[in-house]
Amino acid sequence: MNPFAGIDSIVCGIATHRHDLTAAFQLVYDKYLQAGLTRPSRLAMRIADFQLSKQCVIIVAKVDRRVVGTVSMVGEIDGRLPLEQAFPNALSDLRRRQLNLVEIGWFGC
């Protein structure tokens, strides 16, 4: 089976409408739930606090107007990336080199 079959039917863009954002957050929730990484929730969405920041851009991939994948790209918030909240020393070598950093989170089905 060709993993790229039908790739030309995928449309990607920045999520600017509530419907796209909701679908993206529901997609991630569904996958976390299936993997046993979260518990059932009435909200049925997984939203990280950084995704509500102006430093975050959420991109969705759609097939026939249905969200099938999502990427969140976030810049530094208060001088840190979300990864550094959980793993404070994870980027210490890169920080010493004074690089510009972004964090990218991806999810698709």
Image (cartoon, rainbow, N blue to C red):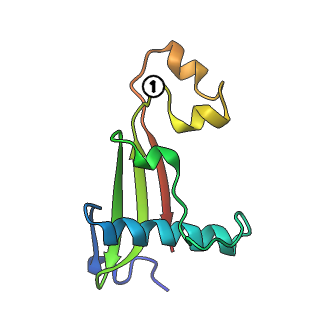
**Position above or below: 53 against 12:** above
**Mark 1: amino acid:** Asp
Q: Is residue 44 left or right of residue 51?
A: right
| Residue lying at the far front of the rendered structure | 42
Q: Nearer the viewer, residue 8 or 59?
A: 59
Tell me the residue that label 1 is attached to.
78
Q: Quadrant of residue 90?
A: top right
**Residue 53, percent across and down?**
39, 42
In this picture, residue 14 sits left or right of residue 70:
left
What residue lies at 42% left-to-right and 52% top-to-bottom?
72
Position of residue 56 measured from the top left corner of the image (x, y, whole percent)? 37, 45
> Under tag 1, what secondary structure?
loop
Determine whether, in the image, residue 43 is placed left or right of residue 13.
Answer: right
Dot 1 surroundings within 10 Å: few (below 14), some, or many (20 or more)?
A: few
Residues 63 and 23: in front is 23
- Using the rendered view, name the quadrant where residue 46 is placed: bottom right
Q: What residue is at 45 percent from the left and 82 percent from the top?
A: 2
Q: Quadrant of residue 93?
A: top right
Residue visible at 58% across and 26% down in the picture: 91
Report the label total.
Answer: 1
- Residue 60, position as x, y percentages in the image: 35, 65
State whether residue 93 is above or below residue 54. Answer: above
Q: Is residue 60 left or right of residue 97?
A: left
29 or 64: nearer the viewer: 29
Residue located at (50% from left, 27% from top): 80
Q: Looking at the picture, how far across and down is residue 1, in whole percent?
A: 50, 86
